[in-house]
Image (tube, helix red, strand yellow):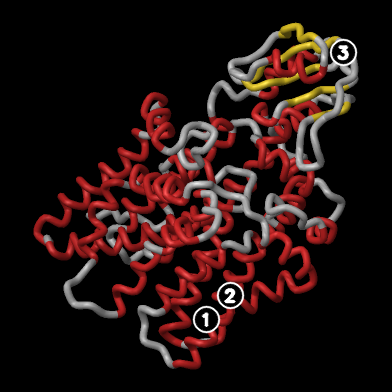
Amino acid sequence: MREHRFHWYYPALLGAIPLLVALVRPLWFDEALTVQNFALLESCGEIYRSWVIPNNQLLYTMMLHNWIGIAALLPLPPDVGMRLFSAMGGFAFLALFGWRFRRSIAMGPVALALAFSLPFALFGTALRGYIWSALWVFIALVGAENYARGGRLHDWALYAAGCILAVATIPTNLAALACVGLFFLRTRVPAKRLWIAGCTPFAMLFLFYGPIWGAFLRIVQWREGWASGGAAALAFYGAFVLAFPLLVAVLPFGWRRKWGRRWVPYGVLLLPGLAFLLLPKAPFPRVFFPLFPLFLILCMEGFDALLARFRPQKGAILAIVGGLAVAWSLFLWMEPVRSTVSTFCGGPMEDDYFYPYGARADFRPEAALQSLAETTFPAVYMSFPADPWSLMFYGRLRGMACEWLFDGPRGAVPSLPDGSAVFLKRGEDPKEIERRFGGTLTVLPSTDFHQCFLWRR
């Protein structure tokens, strides 16, 4: 009887389960802003020319723009249909990851731990470009490693394609491509090949952004991020360790006492920390999610080295470490555990990796809008903490014809029409709104996240 093998495509098939589970959640601030301000523009050319804020992740937004027309034909709610596009990227990533490392005995447990992890489920269904960035960076890695070994033109073309797709989605993916370069350096290559590989990401960046170079320079000058580099570093590295503690534990087995080129890729573990601590404004921790798979490659190599070192116990070690790694990923889905881990990572308003507020059961913008269903309001005012973009998205889906008001970069709202609806986040003081606009607020049916009021002069 032939022994059953763990096939490379199993993680993708099984990983579809948590991706489908994570599809059913409302759009939150950045997602709703991306859809309404950019993805719904008339053409991809207009999206490309509307690069005014980093939220417009150009290539991803153009791809989403084309997908929305297809999603409208599916028998799914609009938000779920749109999220399905990102889930397709997550499925494709798992398939490519499994295929690339199909000869590694440790691939199965590592890929499954990733597939069932909360960070992968959240980023794999977010209406943002991070999961597709991870896919593009991984394609660049495959091309780079093949090009390093053989120097063939088609391998360079694959590497270049991954580079341009990655930077066209998010320019900061240059950092992830620098990490790809560290894997490239593990192979001894001629100087010419090294120069070509090193220049390719920058050439692809200029190729894509050259026609809108002025907009690119303005975006580069943005100073969004975390005030504390130490806190951002703790959130990022802490998220990886909390998501994959057993895989982190086997990572050192890939180290050897003798220094050499095989040590170079371990620099990817340091690069995010340098960015968090040395840049004037620490990047958002989510920016470096595409590095998670590169970290896991090093963990997988350590796992392989562990199995080779204890060959007689290989089967038992594989079953124990692999089984516990997958079980831990599933354990983190439990509500009390998930909330506790999220608190460690900054809480619902800062946590990107485990339980952000947009994924919580109390965040129900559609339910909050139900209190307005029987009444016509001249305007709806929303505080910034109440997530105005999600309320606008679901309000427009309901066909609410009113003026949507919130304080933003263009200035504060000067006044409210009599009879307006007001949305505040639970915990905000409504008396501040009364003092500010000189009227009174009457409580309307609310939710655990949103407070809803009727404003009268």
Residue 193 is left or right of residue 443, and the answer is left
Q: CA distance from mark 3 to mark 1?
A: 61 Å
For label 2, the SS is: helix
Residue at coordinates 52% horizontally, 34% vertically from top-left?
Answer: 356
Residue for badge 2: 201
Q: Quadrant of the N terminus?
A: bottom left
The part of the image, by quadrant, that contains residue 46 is: bottom right
Residue 248 is left or right of residue 289, and the answer is left
Residue for badge 1: 198
Say if 387 sits above or below 6 in the image: above
Residue at coordinates 38% horizontally, 24% vertically from top-left?
Answer: 336
Q: Residue furthest top?
A: 442
Residue for badge 3: 419
Q: Nearer the viewer, residue 248 or 73?
A: 248
Q: Alpha-carbon neighbours of circle 3 within 10 Å: few (<14), some, or many (≥20)? A: some
Q: Position of residue 58 (x, y in %)?
A: 71, 58
Q: Quadrant of the C terminus?
A: top right
Circles 3, 1 touching at the beta carbon (< 8 Å): no
User: Which of disc 3 and disc 2 is earlier in sequence?
Assistant: 2
Residue type indicated by callout 3: Gly
* Mark in the foreground, 3 or 1: 3
* Mark in the foreground, 2 or 3: 3
Q: Position of residue 185 (x, y in %)?
A: 40, 79
User: Which of disc 1 and disc 3 is earlier in sequence?
Assistant: 1
Circles 1, 2 touching at the beta carbon (< 8 Å): yes
Residue at coordinates 89% horizontally, 25% vertically from top-left?
Answer: 401
Residue type indicated by callout 2: Pro
The part of the image, by quadrant, that contains residue 216 is: bottom right
Q: Nearer the viewer, residue 381 or 279?
A: 279
Q: CA distance from mark 1 to mark 2?
A: 7 Å
Residue type indicated by callout 1: Gly
Q: Position of residue 312 (x, y in %)?
A: 9, 59
